[in-house]
């Protein structure tokens, strides 16, 4: 397609600029010029799948409305499925996105000074993004790049969406070579992914045919150093977490590379999205700046649920369906939650003091907003059905 008349100055270049909460919606599309690399080609492929196979995809994710190639004469399916990295100077494309009044969800959360609204957005967001994850998983789409930057919220429709589809993969449609290619290309986005993803990254990066006990120790040390939320807890917790990592990886010692990658992708990848979301929310909870007077343990149980989802051993993590069920039980003040009842959170001294303050303030809201069990249940039934709740 021709690029005649294109005005670069009117385009927003990738990465997407952050929007402030007072930005008004206009009727003009948002234009972005992106380099045609594996990321953008993958976005085109995933968007094509969503648009042709799913009618209500827009409720969970934001795709471009159209794109125009700049410097490339055609872009057919064969071009999209190339199993080699695109060279930097291959070409560019102009992507057009429909105008929406969406905000960066976590920017809005951090800028919220009212405790009632903060906990409302926290609850609403957790439910909303769990719904997004459930949607993607129902179509066997894996997102290896879930992060606060691509999680958006529309205050008008009360809908939470995933914006950036460049890191979404349909594993069943990829050959072995394509899986290795994509996973190596997306290594830079693995901050919120579990220890076994780092094993795949290590094998690909080092071109290893297997891993040893020494390799595992190096992977675990690097992993814990790069995940700050683990350091919020006591040395006892961190050491326990390290041992859990060792137990989860020992079955892969001296196994061939193909076996390791296939086993991890088949048995654990379905928990990666909830792992990422839970890791993000743990960091958000530790970022709270509120103080109050009384605690009921509500947020304490939420934190325990998030920690379950970030366990190194996959059998201890919860699926997205189980997470939704447990979260509903917490919101309905169900004391008989076996998975959480006996779980102990060990925090270091500074984090313990800080989190206690957070628990006090947020639980004060829960008491005030839910004076009766009936009102409590109704509030979260509405949240479950519509992705929102009214205070």
Image (cartoon, rainbow, N blue to C red):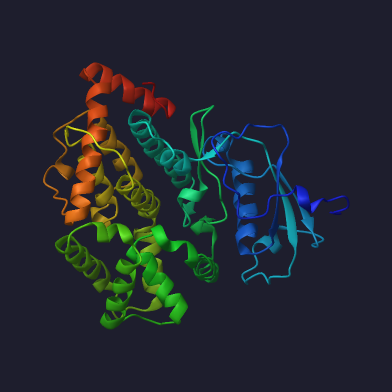
In the picture, the quarter occupied by the C terminus is top left
24 or 213: nearer the viewer = 24
In the picture, the quarter occupied by the N terminus is bottom right
Residue 381 lies, with reference to residue 233, above or below; the image says above
Q: Toward which corner of the image does residue 246 lie, by quadrant? A: bottom left
Residue 85 lies, with reference to residue 306, above or below; the image says below
Left or right of residue 294: residue 32: right
Disc tally is: 0
In the rendered image, residue 285, in percent from the top left (x then y), is placed at 31, 45
In the rendered image, residue 87, in percent from the top left (x then y), is placed at 68, 72
Residue for point 87% across, 50% down: 5
Is residue 384 shown to the viewer in this render? yes
Left or right of residue 177: residue 221: left
238 or 248: nearer the viewer = 238
In the rendered image, residue 67, in percent from the top left (x then y), is placed at 73, 49
In the rendered image, residue 15, in percent from the top left (x then y), is placed at 60, 55
């Amino acid at each position: 397609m021709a690029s005649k008349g294109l005005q670069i100055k009117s385009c927003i270049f990738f990465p997407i600029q952050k929007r402030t909460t007072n930005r008004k919606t206009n009727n003009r599309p948002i234009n972005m010029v992106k380099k045609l690399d594996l990321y953008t080609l993958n976005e085109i492929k995933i968007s094509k799948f969503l648009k042709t196979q799913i009618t209500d995809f827009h409720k969970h994710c934001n795709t471009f409305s159209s794109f125009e190639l700049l410097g490339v004469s055609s872009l057919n399916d064969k071009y999209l499925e190339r199993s080699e990295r695109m060279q930097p100077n291959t070409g560019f494309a102009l992507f057009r996105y429909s105008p929406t009044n969406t905000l960066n969800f976590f920017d809005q959360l951090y800028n919220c000074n009212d405790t009632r609204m903060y906990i409302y957005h926290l609850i609403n967001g957790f439910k909303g993004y769990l719904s997004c994850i459930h949607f993607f998983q129902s179509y066997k789409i894996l997102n290896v790049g879930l992060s606060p930057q691509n999680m958006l919220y529309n205050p008008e429709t009360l809908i939470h969406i995933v914006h950036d589809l460049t890191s979404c993969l349909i594993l069943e449609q990829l050959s072995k070579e394509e899986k290795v290619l994509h996973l190596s290309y997306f290594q830079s986005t693995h901050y919120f992914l579990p220890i076994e993803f780092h094993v795949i990254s290590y094998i690909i990066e080092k071109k290893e045919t297997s891993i040893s006990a020494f390799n595992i120790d190096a992977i675990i040390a690097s992993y814990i150093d790069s995940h700050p939320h683990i350091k919020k807890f006591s040395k006892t917790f961190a050491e326990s977490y390290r041992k859990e990592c060792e137990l989860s990886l020992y079955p892969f010692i001296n196994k061939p590379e193909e076996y390791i990658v296939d086993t991890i992708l088949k048995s654990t990848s379905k928990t990666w999205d909830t792992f990422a979301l839970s890791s993000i929310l743990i960091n958000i909870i530790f970022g709270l700046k509120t103080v109050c007077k009384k605690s009921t343990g509500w947020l304490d149980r939420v934190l325990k649920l998030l920690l379950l989802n970030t366990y190194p051993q996959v059998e201890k993590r919860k699926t997205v369906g189980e997470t939704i069920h447990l979260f509903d039980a917490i919101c309905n003040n169900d004391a008989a939650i076996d998975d959480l009842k006996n779980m102990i959170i060990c925090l270091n001294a500074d984090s313990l003091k800080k989190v206690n303050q957070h628990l006090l303030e947020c639980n004060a809201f829960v008491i005030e907003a839910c004076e009766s069990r009936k009102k409590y249940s109704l509030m979260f039934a509405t949240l479950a059905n519509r992705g929102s709740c009214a205070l």
